Image (cartoon, rainbow, N blue to C red):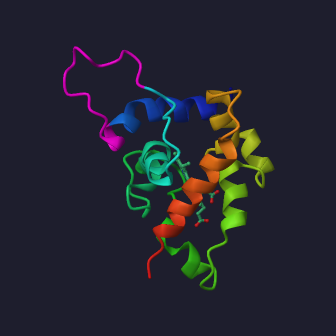
């Protein structure tokens, strides 16, 4: 695993559970290591767990990690608006998965490549494309009208 990806997973481990609001009220029940994989395939759950740390719960780019990035996350609620009124689902699925970002493999971009991350969390998981599609559909639902 590359260093940027590792850093993201560490950020997730600290931020994710808080964002999702996992019930960790009692410290006696708190797992030593918070989960890095959530079983839910719902786009909303995935977004809250994996994306909101940077992009914010509403997608506007105000997540707790955002200020530590050199490049602020773009406002995800204006993607359609910035794209002539069309939400480019297919392009975004490739972008989020990392398929269209050869540069990302060299760690020069701050947006993590989620395809390999999801795949490395569950190597035999065939649901990676489903997770990507669902989370992108959720981003589509965040578009301002
Ligand atoms: C570590 C912080 C971070 C996390 C976590 C993160 N992103 Fe991003 N995201 C960014 C940054 C920074 C950019 C801008 C990157 C660029 O343009 O090269 C970006 C860009 C994007 C874009 C393109 C937006 C546009 O207007 O062009 C989409 C879509 C996106 N992210 C979706 C997601 C989804 C879905 C997740 C969760 C699966 C996620 N991001 C998790 C930091 C993050």
Extreme residue in the left direction:
26
Viewer-closest of 74 and 18? 18
| In the displayed structure image, the side of residue 62 where residue 26 appears, left or right | left
Quick check: can you spot residue 99? Answer: yes
| Residue 88, picture quadrant | bottom right
Viewer-closest of 120 and 43? 43
Ligand 1's image quarter is: bottom right
Q: Main secondary structure of the magenta part?
A: loop
Identify the residue shown where x is 63% and y is 80%: 86
| In the displayed structure image, the side of residue 76 where residue 48 appears, left or right | left
Q: Is 107 above or below relative to 2?
A: below
The number of numbered discs placed on residues in the rendered structure image is 0
| In the displayed structure image, the side of residue 50 where residue 102 appears, left or right | right
Magenta segment boundaries in residue numbering: 18-34
The image position of residue 52, as x and y in percent, is 43, 50
Quarter holding the C terminus? Answer: bottom left
Identify the residue shown where x is 61% and y is 34%: 5
Identify the residue shown where x is 62% and y is 44%: 112
The image position of residue 15, as x and y in percent, is 38, 37
The image position of residue 99, as x and y in percent, is 77, 51
Q: Is 92 above or below relative to 85?
A: above
Quick check: can you spot residue 110? Answer: no
Q: Is 27 above or below relative to 89?
A: above
| Residue 22, picture quadrant | top left
């Amino acid at each position: 695993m590359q260093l940027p990806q590792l850093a993201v997973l560490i950020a997730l481990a600290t931020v994710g559970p808080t964002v999702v609001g996992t019930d960790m009220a009692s410290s006696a029940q708190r797992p030593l290591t918070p989960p890095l994989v959530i079983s839910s395939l719902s786009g909303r759950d995935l977004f809250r767990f994996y994306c909101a740390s940077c992009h914010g719960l509403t997608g506007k780019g105000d997540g707790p990690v955002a200020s530590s990035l050199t490049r602020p996350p773009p406002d995800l609620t204006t993607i359609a608006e910035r794209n002539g009124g069309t939400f480019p689902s297919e392009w975004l699925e490739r972008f989020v998965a990392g398929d269209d970002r050869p540069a990302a493999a060299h760690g020069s971009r701050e947006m993590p490549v989620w395809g390999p991350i999801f795949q490395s969390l569950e190597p035999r998981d065939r649901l990676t494309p489903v997770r990507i599609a669902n989370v992108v559909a959720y981003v589509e639902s965040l578009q301002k009208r």
